[in-house]
Image (cartoon, rainbow, N blue to C red):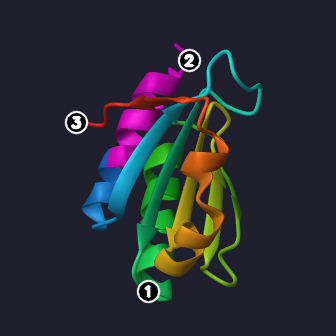
């Protein structure tokens, strides 16, 4: 059975929370973009925390059988974790404020991550 994007998003959120990611925001892109079904946006307060969050998300997604592609680990300022239907953006706090993806994708509906 294929992994649903909803289940993958839940697992990714738990992985990010496990590493104390800040201000998690889920965006539902279904019907808005072909890029992915969901974006998860969060941030860490240090390069070390950003790397830890990204590694935990990658690990959990791979355990569920998702194919994972990472970009940005070398600088740890904005790590993009592409898992197909779910894309996680793990920012360093300063970069998150600068890029403000939530505003860029303001057409997308926020997803309850509770």
Q: Nearer the viewer, mark 2 or mark 1?
A: 1
Point out which mark residue 114 bears.
3
| Magenta span dominant secondary structure | helix
Residue 26, compared with residue 55, is above or below; it is above
Verify CB contact (< 8 Å) between mark 2 and mark 1: no
Verify CB contact (< 8 Å) between mark 3 and mark 2: no
Residue name at image x 36 percent, y 35 percent: 10
Residue name at image x 51 percent, y 35 percent: 27
Residue 21, compared with residue 59, is above or below; it is below
Distance Cα–Cα, label 3 vs label 2: 24 Å
Q: Nearer the viewer, mark 3 or mark 2?
A: 3
Q: Which residue is mark 2?
A: 2
The location of residue 46, given as percent across then percent down, is 43, 86
How many C-alpha atoms fall within 10 Å of the one at disc 1: few (<14), some, or many (≥20)? Answer: some
Q: Which residue is mark 1?
A: 46
In the rendered structure, which disc, 1 or 3, sits on the residue that comes first in sequence?
1
- Depth check: 84 or 92 in front? 92
Q: Answer whether residue 50 is magenta in the image.
A: no
In the rendered structure, which disc, 2 or 1, sits on the residue that comes first in sequence?
2
Residue name at image x 27 percent, y 67 percent: 20
Residue 49, compared with residue 57, is above or below; it is below
């Amino acid at each position: 059975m294929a992994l649903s994007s909803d289940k993958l998003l839940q697992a990714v959120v738990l992985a990010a929370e496990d590493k104390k990611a800040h201000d998690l925001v889920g965006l539902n892109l279904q019907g808005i973009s072909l890029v992915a079904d969901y974006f998860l946006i969060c941030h860490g307060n240090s390069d070390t925390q950003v790397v830890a969050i990204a590694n935990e998300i990658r690990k959990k997604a791979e355990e569920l059988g998702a194919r994972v592609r990472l970009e940005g680990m070398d600088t740890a300022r904005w790590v993009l974790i592409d898992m197909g239907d779910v894309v996680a953006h793990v920012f360093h706090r300063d970069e998150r404020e600068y890029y403000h993806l939530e505003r860029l994708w303001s057409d997308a509906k926020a997803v309850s991550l509770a």
